[in-house]
Amino acid sequence: MPLVETPVPFPSLVLTALGESRRTLLDLFGAALEAVSGQGAVARRLAGWEVGGAVVLLAVGKAAQAMTAGARTVLGERLARGLVVSKVGHLDSSLLTAWGLEGLEAGHPLPTAGSLLAGRRALGVLEGLKSDEGLLVLISGGASSLLEVPAADLGLADLVRVNQWLLGSGLPIAEVNGVRKSLSAIKGGGLLRWLQGRAARVLAISDVPGDDPSAIGSGLLVPEPDLGAWLAALRLPAWLREKVAVGLQERGALPPVGPRIEIVANLDLAKQAVAEAAQARGIPVYLHRGLLEGEAADRGRELARALLAGNAGLHVWGGETTVRLPSHPGRGGRNQQLALAAAMVLAGHEGVCLLSAGTDGSDGPTDDAGALIDGGTLARARAAGLDAQAALRAADAGTLLAATADLVHTGPTGTNVMDLVLGYCFSPRR
């Protein structure tokens, strides 16, 4: 999969060591994506799976197509039928039809009518499961908005309002998913009611801290009976707290246990792949084990300072930051926000660049994976008449980074293991 930056209107970037180093970061990011590819990860895990008869599939998430391809590689015609749900633009419907599978595209990061249709279709898959058929469930990031059966008589407009508030709240993903579970008939283990104790093999690509199965896709098959006490401690607006209370009343009793969730790819695997690819090029590597979280702009400034103070070579971080959105946000996502904040610290420093990107190929509601900035980004912004600080305040980093030719576009990657930040110091900076 080619990784490209937006067309560069500053030719000196591609004719110097800086341009070569930017290309190096893109190549290393590509190595990470290859290591956690949904197709490869699923095919490796299913190799040698002894399954007696036909297998029915339920795949949901941004990596659903790739994970399905991995299952098809191993199972072939034994993959009899099923449902594949992913983000708009992430499915090859003709290929799925040729495999005898139904493909549905739904909304992300906000649910759409397609999300509700996908929820109903998923219940139909489970209800139609025959006693002699096996069930394979493939889950990846994005499933929370792509598949939904609302609780508490919530309509689509209610779900959109709730998710808009959650996405702009700055809450950690665990708390966001906790609210989502309280308003859903299938999240937080709710889907187990339709499984009715039947066996299932469940593979997941982790896009959450600690690879917590209850947080991946909001825990469709992981029972979570004690949501009420946990959610009571959250500071939610009164209108949302009221909806949560009604939703919790409807949850009722859940099966005590669900099937084992097998994690087939995660952030650590992606980071290790970057490190190995860099070492093969003779680049010193500093692998930072802590998880990035918190406000994106704050983390961007911190990482840029660490890059300037640290040793020459490649520095690798990973995680998932947040952005507290203004009432009318501009273009961008958390990776673009982080990268722009870093660019403000790195301004004027030669021999250093930084890439921050989502491994799923999208950043917030944009089609860009993130951004790749350097010490000249701010000068290019000023030449374009743009104010970096104003762009940060307006959550409009994407507009500025498009003008400076620093956005990175991958298209759908077939995986989703949170975000990677790669910082490269390739010459003295002082």
Image (spheres, helix red, strand yellow):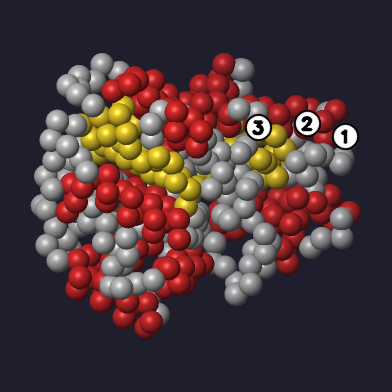
Q: Earlier in the sequence, mark 1 or mark 2?
A: 1
**Closest to the observer, 303 or 323:** 323
- The answer to which of 337 and 332 lies nearer the viewer is 332
**Residue 353 sits in quarter:** top right
The one of 205 and 310 positioned closer to us in this rendering? 205
* Left or right: where 12 falls relative to 20: right
Q: Which mark is residue 3?
A: 3
Tell me whether circle 1 and circle 2 mark residues in contact (CB < 8 Å). Answer: yes
Q: Residue at x 12, y 62 (%)?
A: 253
Q: Is residue 51 left or right of residue 355?
A: left
Q: Is residue 169 visible?
A: no
**Real-space Cα distance between discs 1 and 2?**
8 Å
Say what amino acid the circle numbered 1 marks.
Ser
Q: Circle 1 is placed at which residue position?
A: 12
* Residue assigned mark 2: 19
**Sooner in the amino-acid sequence: mark 3 or mark 1:** 3
Q: Secondary structure at mark 1?
A: helix
Q: Is residue 62 above or below residue 176?
A: above
Could you say where residue 12 lies in the image, as x and y percent from the top left? 87, 34
What's the residue type where badge 3 is placed? Answer: Leu
